[in-house]
Image: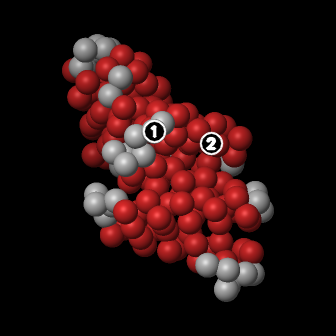
Amino acid sequence: DEALEILDKSFTETASFNKNNFEVGINHLYQAQAYRYQRDLDKTEEQLNLATPILEYHQDTLSLIRLQRTFSLLAYNRYDYPTSEKYCQKALDLIGEEVGQYAFECARIYNQLGNLYTDQNKMKAGRNYYEKAMQLTRRSRTAPHLMYSVLFDNISRFHRISGNWDSM
């Protein structure tokens, strides 16, 4: 907590809003992700709002995908499923036909959609997105082993909720 507060203060004091400073935008995005893991959703949103104009200015597709996915996770943590789904769709729109190039990020978004639909008891849609996420994770050369762990955990959760242990 203290380290994040010091980092936050240093950004505020030394980096006034400057659209040309891409690294500041990325740092705000990473800081938002760290706050989200700590479940400090207000600070998450604050950092995302600081990152957005900078990253949009630079039009770096990977960063914009991650920005939209992080907004989706923020909405998900607030149980605002329609908004979370909207941000997932924005991220998928950014990926477009470039799924191969962004396979790992796409798998993460599909996993998120699987969670969204499972939590809303839309089991068929949840299962379909978990399957898509697993297929992309298997094909991706950049997917870390942690992604498999996350997917297996979520698929197990899906089976507990659905009661359908033999379906996958």
Residue 8 higher or lower than 114, as above or below: above
Quadrant for residue 14, please give it: top left
Left or right: where 76 falls relative to 3: right
Q: Position of residue 22 (x, y in %)?
A: 26, 24
Residue at far bottom of view: 166
- Check disc 1 and give the amino acid type: Glu
Residue at (59% x, 38% y) in the render: 89
- Which circle's residue, 2 or 1, is located before the other in the chain? 2
Label 2 element class:
helix
Colouring scheme, one of rainbow, by chain, secondary structure, one colour: secondary structure
User: Is 40 displayed left or right of 117 in the figure?
Assistant: left
**How far separated are the C-alphas under marks 2 and 1?**
22 Å
> Which residue lies at the image location 67% right of the left edge and 80% below the top edge?
167
Determine whether, in the image, residue 44 is placed left or right of residue 29. right
Q: Nearer the viewer, residue 142 or 24?
A: 142
Q: Amino acid at mark 2?
A: Ser
On the question of residue 54 being in view, the answer is no
Query: Which of the two residues, 32 or 60, is positioned nearer the viewer here?
Result: 60
Question: Label 1 belongs to which residue?
Answer: 97
Furthest residue in direction front, as rendered: 97
Residue 116: which quarter of the image? bottom right
| Residue labelled with disc 2 | 84
Residue farthest to the right, as pictured? 121
Would you place residue 8 above or below residue 102 in this image? above
